[in-house]
Amino acid sequence: DQQVKQNSPSLSVQEGRISILNCDYTNSMFDYFLWYKKYPAEGPTFLISISSIKDKNEDGRFTVFLNKSAKHLSLHIVPSQPGDSAVYFCAAKRAGKSTFGDGTTLTVKP
Amino acid sequence: DTGVSQDPRHKITKRGQNVTFRCDPISEHNRLYWYRQTLGQGPEFLTYFQNEAQLEKSRLLSDRFSAERPKGSFSTLEIQRTEQGDSAMYLCASSFRYGQEEEKLFFGSGTQLSVL
């Protein structure tokens, strides 16, 4: 029973364009949703988060949108840069424990 | 802030042997987590500690796995009688929990275990 799903294993976009990464969840009790970014041979690093009581959070080029009725969240990166190329994990938190999706590999082409 | 460090970075062992990994969290962090990651999948929760107390352990974790966090500082994860299915990246993460906040995790670079 996978509670957090990222249905697109990969995404390729042109530099300067928008990247949209999607995530679906099943448990309505999650209280926070977080995005992490991972480069090869490194552990994931925190990128941005959103509380379950909000519908949008913005930090520079990164914006996360939450649609609770659809149990769906998305990460928007605009404009995309080649340095954004990495694996992005969506995570949902409840009672201290974070549950991760399987990740989306983003490639930003120059 | 030296970040979360894990040792060793790589471990190759033969099936049936015991292995132990160490994690040193960020010093002021009170929570420490162990995750396991295999190729093409996201980190899978194993267990976590608040200070020295182990608060939760995954139902998927067999009795061959044990973790400790003596004195609420570093932590060790031991796998007894390793099996080939234990081959994975073992990630440690720490956080500071003080209220109803997002509690973002700070991950180490992981220990890559290969069981032959």
Image (cartoon, rainbow, N blue to C red):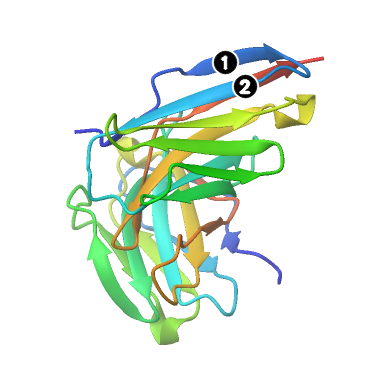
Estimate the x, y position of residue B12 in percent, counting from the top left.
50, 44
Q: Amino acid at mark 1?
A: Leu
Per the image, the residue denoted by label 1 is: A11
Question: Measuring 66% from the left and 20% from the top, which residue is drawn there?
Answer: A18
Query: In the picture shown, does residue A88 fall above or below A57?
Result: above
From this view, report whether residue A58 is shown above or below residue B51.
above
Front residue of B71/A73: it is A73
Q: Amino acid at mark 2?
A: Ser
> Which label is found at residue A109?
none
Count every numbered label the image shows and give the total: 2
Residue at figure coordinates x 41%, y 37% from the top left: A66
State which quadrant residue B77 falls in: bottom left
The C terminus of chain A sits in image quarter? top right
Q: In front: mark 1 or mark 2?
A: 2
Q: Nearer the viewer, residue B63 or A18?
A: A18
- Answer with the quarter of the image where residue B34 lies: bottom left
Whole-Å distance between the Cαs marked 1 and 2? 8 Å
SS label for mark 2: strand
According to the image, label 2 marks what residue? Answer: A19
Tell me if B12 is positioned left or right of A73 in this view: right
Quarter in which the N terminus of chain A is drawn = top left
Question: Which one is nearer the viewer's eye here, B62 or B49?
Answer: B49
Side of B100 relative to B66 (left or right): right
Judged left or right of residue A107, residue B113 is left
Residue B18 placement: quadrant:
bottom left
Q: Give whichever of discs 1 and 2 has the lower sequence position.
A: 1
Residue neighbourhood size for the residue with mark 2, other residues' Cα within 10 Å, grouped as few (<14), some (14–19), many (≥20): many
